[in-house]
Amino acid sequence: MAERRRRKAGEDSGEPQGATDNFSWSGEGVRRTLKTSEIVALEIVRDIVSQGLKAGDRLPLEAQMLVQYRVSRSSLREALRLLEVQGLIAIRPGPGSGTVVGKVLPGNLARTMTLYLHLAGSTYDQLLDAWLQTEPLLAELAAKNPDRARVKAAMAPFLEGSDTCHGGKLREIKAGLAFHDVVAELADNPVLTLVLKAIGFITAEHILVAAPREELEDRIVDDHAVLAEAIWAGKPALARKLMAEHVEHIVADFKVYWPRRVGEKVQWR
């Protein structure tokens, strides 16, 4: 089965045949043939999904995978390294060693994305603009989420008048970042959630935490409270508007604090 998949990958790229054989749909030119290790990595991921494995579940031992995928030890280990770098698996050394399924985390995608952004010459100003354009969409979708019980439970801690809204924990920087993560999860679209949370992760890690602050300012906590109310009440247009104003305020503050940074290239890290 594995060998048949590898042959098929080399024979069928999914491109229409004929005059366009030498061009991909994106105009990138001839699509390169995947290395054996890349194909094996794809097969491992497909098997993780088809078997319904979850984060922390063990994968077969190396000897078993060598038989299963019919490849050399060097190709298998390279495939595993490719997946480990992406955070899709974790290789544990020492006692209890083995390979386990990793978590699908926006931070892992974000780190790969920063490499592409750096090579593309993207600046932090452009990153901030992307965050400004996309974060309001997540708020709108969160307010539209039909599972109202889930929405209300997620937004309840941030509502004005709740026991936690202006308490110590929700004034912590990590609580402010968590609010945006919760909104993204409530958007209920795994594609948008993963990709746009990756943009938010880069923005937070490279920019938002750069300004020295021990806790969130009152305005940010208040913004979160009114946003939580709009999402809780199922008002998508209002949620989008409030999130746009909230992000605009944060971006403006950062540009005043560190004006030179916004023109720099996004760094890979």
Image: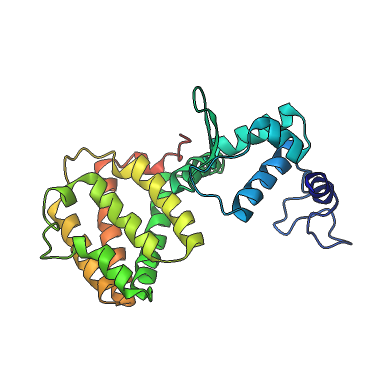
Res 122 visible: no
Between 141 and 247, the residue placed more toward the observer is 141
- Image colouring: rainbow
Instruction: Where is residue 264? Give x, y as percent.
Output: 42, 39
| Count of numbered circles on the image | 0
Q: Is residue 263 above or below residue 135?
A: above
Between 92 and 64, the residue placed more toward the observer is 64
Residue drawn at point x = 33 percent, y = 72 percent: 143
Quarter of the C terminus within the rendering: top left
Between 260 and 180, the residue placed more toward the observer is 180
Residue drawn at point x = 36 percent, y = 69 percent: 142
Q: Is residue 68 above or below residue 52?
A: above
Which image quadrant is residue 159 in?
A: bottom left
Instruction: Where is residue 134? Give x, y as percent.
Output: 41, 61
Determine whether, in the image, residue 80 is placed left or right of residue 182: right
Determine whether, in the image, residue 6 is placed left or right of residue 41: right
Q: Is residue 33 above or below residue 138?
A: above
Determine whether, in the image, residue 139 is placed left or right of residue 58: left
Res 14 visible: yes
Determine whether, in the image, residue 181 is placed left or right of residue 105: left
Instruction: Where is residue 19? Give x, y as percent.
Output: 88, 61
Kindly give the residue lying farthest to the top in the view shown. 94
Residue drawn at point x = 36 percent, y = 41 percent: 205
Instruction: Where is residue 112? Give x, y as percent.
Output: 53, 41
